[in-house]
Image (cartoon, coloured by chain):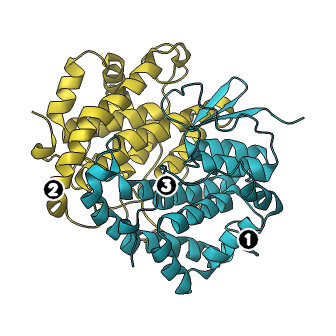
Chain colours: A yellow, B cyan
């Protein structure tokens, strides 16, 4: 019997909901109501509804699902280790990306903060992005990361899915910048992990399906003027 | 026997470490090494060291400590409920506050992004801050929040300490703005909670001690030009 989850999120864009969708897809969990935004959430989407339980905040939803579906230990050191990695990835490779096109007002249009966005994006692509990729490369090379391409313990966890979606979104948003970083060879393990997630049978099928939504006006946006040359 | 925790954080400012310190103080836990920054952390402080375990990311450290020291349920719906509230408070009332004085570059001086900071701070004080205070007011008024001044279940949890520190920092950073919001009466339960935490015996003693560090160049900074009139 499949648990009945409902993801409440804006329809028509991957956004923060995509981190949750990837976990559900990899876990092979029924998710009929993905993208349903009919029921306004308490503060902000994504919200996961599971029976009477409403769970808010992306890293919290991921923690809940992953520990129920074998994509993370349900307790102990590994639980906190992965939560730390997930928070770092979501902060540095997702939340900060949103700031590159909305540096002075979350609620105002990009066009009204374009100049500030150029400054923020230049700092992000030059300093912040290499810093965070370097951090995950270091984790992957570390002796505690186990064998294989994964970030923790030799088996796929939800944090690998998070990092995959980060890289995928960054490739879309900053193709020149990410292309150069990939070509540098300094982050080979990060890009190997990206490919290894992409090759997972369920993820591969999902990415090729219509369930996978196209990038649009969410976190990852492609504005050529914010990408390097 | 008191567990031996070590908090690795920048010395001389409250910052994100303060959320952790408040939990340790309320729990009455020995914390001799607070403020020790001698050991560079993997990516960014705060880091909690507990035996061989190194725990990163503020909300993750809080989750770990709170579930060990009776400031949160160790599992189940309450665990995730509180984690969601903590993430919301830390995002909206702490991370976004840092953005008000560093909207275009985390690594550059405030003085070099002062004009952009004015725009970001205006948006924050007018739109974002009332939105988040309104959310917590709603939670406090909600029937699920239990009796008394607390956010969850009728007893103090770590999320009350987080919200206390948020409000305390906001009062320092934006005295005019917060003064007006408090005087409006729309957020009475939030400010009652603030006072109730302040009156906790251990917190009261801590706040009056030299262990409590003064606000300085951390998350909460007082730049009069960023505060309303």
User: Quick check: can you spot residue B70?
Assistant: no
Nearest to N terminus: mark 3 or mark 2: 3
| Chain for disc number 1 | B
For residue A40, what is the image quadrant? bottom left
- The residue lying toward the viewer, choosing from B110 and B80, is B110
Q: Chain of mark 3?
A: A
Q: Are marks 3 and 2 on the same chain?
A: yes
Residue A61 visible in the displayed image: yes
Alpha carbon separation for disc pair 3 and 2: 28 Å
Is the same chain shared between marks 2 and 1? no
**Left or right placement of residue B80 versus residue A196 in this view:** right
**Residue depicted at x 55% and y 21%:** A153
Residue B30 or residue A134, whichever sits in front: B30
Residue ID for mark 2: A114
Q: Residue at x 30, y 17 (%)?
A: A186
Residue at label 1?
B196
**In which quadrant is the C terminus of chain A drawn?**
top left
* Residue A66 in the image, given as x and y percentages of width and height: 54, 40
Q: Which mark is residue A57?
A: 3
**What numbered label is drawn on residue A45?**
none
Give the percent coordinates (x, y) of residue A117: 20, 51
- Element on which disc 1 rests: helix
């Amino acid at each position: 019997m499949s648990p009945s989850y409902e993801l409440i999120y804006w329809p028509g864009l991957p956004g923060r909901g995509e981190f949750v969708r990837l976990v559900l897809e990899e876990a092979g969990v029924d998710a009929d109501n993905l993208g349903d935004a009919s029921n306004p959430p308490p503060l902000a989407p994504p919200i996961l509804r599971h029976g009477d339980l409403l769970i808010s905040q992306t890293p919290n939803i991921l923690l809940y699902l992953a520990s129920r579906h074998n994509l993370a230990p349900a307790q102990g050191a590994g639980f906190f280790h992965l939560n730390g990695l997930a928070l770092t990835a979501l902060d540095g490779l997702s939340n900060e990306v949103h700031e590159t096109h909305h540096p002075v007002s979350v609620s105002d249009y990009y066009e009204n903060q374009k100049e500030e966005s150029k400054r923020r994006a230049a700092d992000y692509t030059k300093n912040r992005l290499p810093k965070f990729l370097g951090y995950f490369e270091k984790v992957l090379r570390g002796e505690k990361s186990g064998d294989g391409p994964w970030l923790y313990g030799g088996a796929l966890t939800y944090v690998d899915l998070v990092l995959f979606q980060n890289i995928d979104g960054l490739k879309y948003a900053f193709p020149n910048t990410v292309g150069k970083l990939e070509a540098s060879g300094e982050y080979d393990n990060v890009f190997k992990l990206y490919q290894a997630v992409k090759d997972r049978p369920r993820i591969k099928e999902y990415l090729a399906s219509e369930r996978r939504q196209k990038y649009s006006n969410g976190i990852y946006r492609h504005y050529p003027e914010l990408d390097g040359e």
